Image (spheres, rainbow, N blue to C red):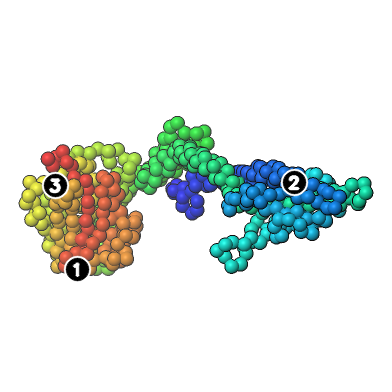
Amino acid sequence: MLRGVGAGGLSLQRQLLLWLLLPQLVLWLAGGFATYRLAAGYANRAIDDSLSQASRALARQIKPLESGLLIDFPRAAQDVLEADPEDRLYYMVSTPPGRFILGSRTLPPPPAIAQPRLNVPYFYDGSMAVAEADQELPRQQRVRVAALYLAYGGADSARQLLLVQVARSSANREELARGILVDTLLPLSGLIVLMTMIVWAGIRAGLAPLARLRREVENRAPTDLAPLHIEQAPRELQSLARALNELLGAARRNVAAQKRFIGDAAHQLRTPLAGLKSQTELALQGCADAELRARLERVHQSATRSAHLVNQLLTLARAEPESALVQDRSPVDLRQLARELTAEMVPRALRAGVDLGLDESEAEGDAGTVPVRANGLLLREALSNLIDNAIRYAGRGAEVTLRARREGMQAVVEVEDNGPGIPVTERERVFERFVRGTHGGDGCGLGLAIVREIVERHAGTASLEDGAAGGLRVVLRLPLDLAAAA
């Protein structure tokens, strides 16, 4: 029988969802990384442009003289560069490069260049110590630096290099890059979530026929071998359904052949067994030899047991789902049926030394009827088997009581005795075919199997419970016929 797709590991739906969402997650991460790199590149370009302009503007304030350099950098210009504490510009002028002249001494030096190009800014990242007014020790700050090499000196003096450095904190650049990243990833994340929902809905819709097939198989009784019906399903699932239907068809034909064989064999055996019983009864009546009489009694017992087995097999065949008798149903009053069977079985109970009776105390308040819609012949056979088992195994001096009552929306029939009962561990097994709850008696192990088969064919249940006096209580529950009960 097919089981749920989730048994034994991840479900097919989860696997498909995982394999479809994993590439989206990878693309989302790659997109975020590429976006951050791109945003950082644009932020660097913007900062580098501003640093380039600042370094050239500062370089224009430096004028070479015969005796040295004239730096025309008034205090007001310095205050403008350092006005914003969150985005300050740091600068340093040195000549030869590395020998401080003006600005901040803590600017990181540029990478070593053997022959630097003149009037072309170089850009690099570094860190510098920055003193804060509310802190005793300076803190390290990451900065973006532009380095501009200039040459000064005339024909009469040697040409010398002049280094102009302008730096800006990297915090604004990183904040700008993070802002661009967030502004890009938020709508991208929304699209990913929307795509995930669409993919999930698509997977559910695509696997819906498989779920219907699973439900159709799971809701079936083990004996239901009818073909599966899957409409508007994908070709792959239709192929699976066809393969299952072929398998079910083969099993159905095999089971039908076995049932026909059992039924035919049982029918063929009934007549000779009945004749054998009659002949042994006649022989016993006219036999005076004690040894021969004992042998004839054993033959008669074997014939009786064989006839009982044949009758049970025929009853079991009639209770099968494929039998037309199961489909023939009409209103049946369980209490009236219990009365009739009790009256019929009393003589046999008396011969076995068993007190058989019907408890009708539950009749008050329910109009004295317990109606169900069922096949009366099969229900009669089921109750007869229960009463027969109770008389057969309860023992001499035992009491057997029948009850039929309404219980909510159910009709309940009980057959209770005060005999030895059946151990709790064996109560489920005795409903199997050819399994007996005791080694005594001459039963064939089919009685309770027939009862459960008949009750389940009528959408009911059969169970074994402890009796009030320590014996066994067999409880049958069937759906109440609401139309007849109204």
Left or right: 212 as drawn, with respect to 440:
right
Q: Which residue is mark 2?
A: 61
Count the marks: 3
Q: Which residue is mark 1?
A: 470
In the rendered image, the residue lying farthest to the right is: 156
Left or right: 460 as drawn, with respect to 404:
right
Q: Is disc 3 surrounded by few (<14), some (14 to 19) or many (20+) residues within 10 Å?
A: many
- Measuring 28% from the left and 41% from the top, which residue is drawn there? 326
Residue 440 in the image: x percent, y percent?
28, 66
Q: Which residue is mark 3?
A: 370
Q: Secondary structure at mark 3?
A: loop
Of residue 267 and residue 50, the one placed in the foreground of this image is: 50
Q: Is disc 1 surrounded by few (<14), some (14 to 19) or many (20+) residues within 10 Å?
A: some
Amino acid, disc 2:
Gln
- Measuring 7% from the left and 46% from the top, which residue is drawn there? 367
Give the Cα distance between marks 2 and 1: 115 Å
Disc 3 vs disc 2: Cβ atoms closer than 8 Å?
no
- Measuring 14% from the left and 52% from the top, which residue is drawn there? 404
Left or right: 197 as drawn, with respect to 320:
right
Of residue 196 and residue 111, the one placed in the foreground of this image is: 111
- Measuring 68% from the left and 58% from the top, which residue is drawn there? 127
Give the Cα distance between marks 1 and 3: 27 Å
